[in-house]
Amino acid sequence: MPFEKDTITACATPPGTSALALIRLSGPGSISIAEKLSGKQLPPRSPLPTHLRLQETILDEVVITAWPKPKSYTGEDLVEMSCHGNPIIVQSILQAICTLGARPARPGEFTERAFLNGRMDLTKAEAVLDVLHARSERALRAGQRALSGQLSDRLMADRETLLQLLARIEAWIDFPEEDIQPEVGAGFLSDIKALLKSTASLLSTAPLGYRLRSGYRLVLAGPPNAGKSSLLNALLGMDRALVSPIPGTTRDTVEESITLAGFPVRLIDTAGLHTSKDPVEIQGMARTRVAMQNADLVLALIDSTHPDDPCAKEWELICHQVITVLTKSDLPSKQARKGVRVSAKTGEGLDTLQSQISQRLTADLGAPGADEIAITTRHEDALRKTTEALACASASLMAKSAPELVASDLRLALHSLESILGVGTSEDVLDRLFAQFCIGK
Ligand SMILES: Nc1nc2c(ncn2[C@@H]2O[C@H](COP(=O)(O)OP(=O)(O)OP(=O)(O)O)[C@@H](O)[C@H]2O)c(=O)[nH]1
Ligand SMILES: [Mg+2]
């Protein structure tokens, strides 16, 4: 059922001063409000330069485009106004629009309306979020693919197969005398197995999706004064963390993002690990250990000017993935251990280190594919349920159980699969999802 009640408005561009700002209106009153403010009739889908006036006051010189329903972003009457990017102007236009009957939009409400009006399924609405928030080229490409419908097309194809399987088994339940035995019927089991393969292949993209959205966690660990903060700053190319010759300078974790091999990478500098009775240092080191445990990769820093490191063994115990880094390579070395030699001071070895990190990253998450899709944790949960239900249906079929049992599992699989596309998705899931959007989108 189409969703259309009130008219909403918001500024779709970020707050602050800019050359232009974009104000949007959506809902039944949007075109008439814009026509009242401009005093002109708006041609459909054609930009119109005009002035906006409230009573006798000129609000701004703007360009207005009206997008009549149903072929607009939201599926409702939609108006976009480009005005000068001064927050005072933006505010006065928004106020005037609200005076004429609109209300301020909630975060994501334009996209929510697009979804509720059937302009996009839920995977595409989520892809809008991915495209807006992508922090690397690879994340952006994956988001754009989902937005263009590659994920929903795959899910729709699986849904179609499931519907056909259900129709076949229900026909057998309803007309058993016809003796259409689905377990021996053409390809019934192999269709379920093909579906299982398809959902499993989508499920396998979940770790990639998680890393593309949250970033690959790269932790810099080592004893105090090993040069962790200096290396963090050198990798970032900016002076982010405090550096000093006093051991124990960094007491808490310090995080910053960079892009490596097309991935968003979260660099996490930590408090140095050593034996200490200082309660603040003990807390800081506890955070270091948590960061190491949650890391995708740890750079284990060893000061090459020091012969030994009492905590070195701990890295191997805590971390799965370690690259040993010998720091301060510009100074004479007293270390026999092997590792990537770097100098935060001269930049020596940084290229080698970056390419080793990139190699690990690609080994962990695979090289970018031309049709790469990266599902979200919401998709992952639903796909797991789909897979479980399909596996049950397949087991029941092989055990020659009652066809009603197989049908019930297939219905469950269908229900979970459809929830990914937004069919029957509960209101609180939708609320949580759209709340992640910015206002005006
Ligand atoms: N010569 C030289 N000195 C370095 C290099 N990297 C770090 N240092 C020096 O080593 C000292 C410690 O550096 P930090 O980066 O603060 O070391 P840290 O591991 O973060 O130390 P904590 O925060 O105390 O655990 C500082 O005096 C740095 O200037 C380097 O590549 N070459
Ligand atoms: Mg430090």
Image (cartoon, rainbow, N blue to C red):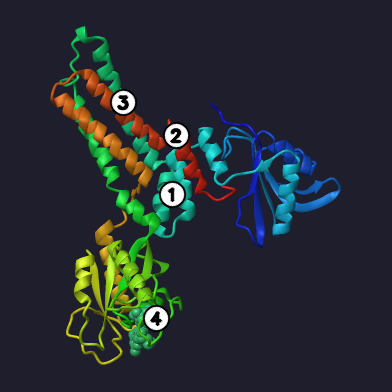
Provide the residue designation for mark 1: 144
Disc 3 marks a residue whose amino acid type is Arg
Of circles 2 and 4, the one toward us is 4
Residue 441 is at least partly visible in this image: yes
Q: Residue farthest to the right?
A: 56
Lateral position of residue 84 relative to residue 157, left or right? right
Q: Given contact means CB atoms under 8 Å apart, are the residues at marks 3 and 4 in contact? A: no
Residue 381 quadrant: top left
Q: Given contact means CB atoms under 8 Å apart, are the residues at marks 3 and 1 in contact? A: no
Dot 2 crowding, Cα within 10 Å, few <14, some 14–19, many 20+: few
Q: Given contact means CB atoms under 8 Å apart, are the residues at marks 2 and 4 in contact? A: no
* Residue at the image point whose x is 69% and y is 40% from the top: 102
- Mark 2 and mark 4: span between their CA atoms? 49 Å
Q: Residue farthest to the bottom?
A: 332
* Image position, residue 98 (x, y; %): 72, 43
Ligand 1 positioned in quadrant = bottom left
Provide the residue designation for mark 3: 411
Residue 345 is at least partly visible in this image: no
Q: Going from the N terminus, do you reach mark 2 or mark 4 first?
A: 4
In front of the other: 141 or 416:
416
Q: Which mark is residue 249?
A: 4
* Residue at the image point whose x is 66% and y is 57% from the top: 20
Q: Given contact means CB atoms under 8 Å apart, are the residues at marks 2 and 3 in contact? A: no
Instruction: Tell me the SS state at disc 1.
Output: helix
Dot 1 crowding, Cα within 10 Å, few <14, some 14–19, many 20+: many
* Image position, residue 204 (x, y; %): 27, 47
Cβ of mark 4 under 8 Å from ligand 1: the answer is yes
* Image position, residue 210 (x, y; %): 35, 53
Q: Going from the N terminus, do you reach mark 1 or mark 2 first?
A: 1
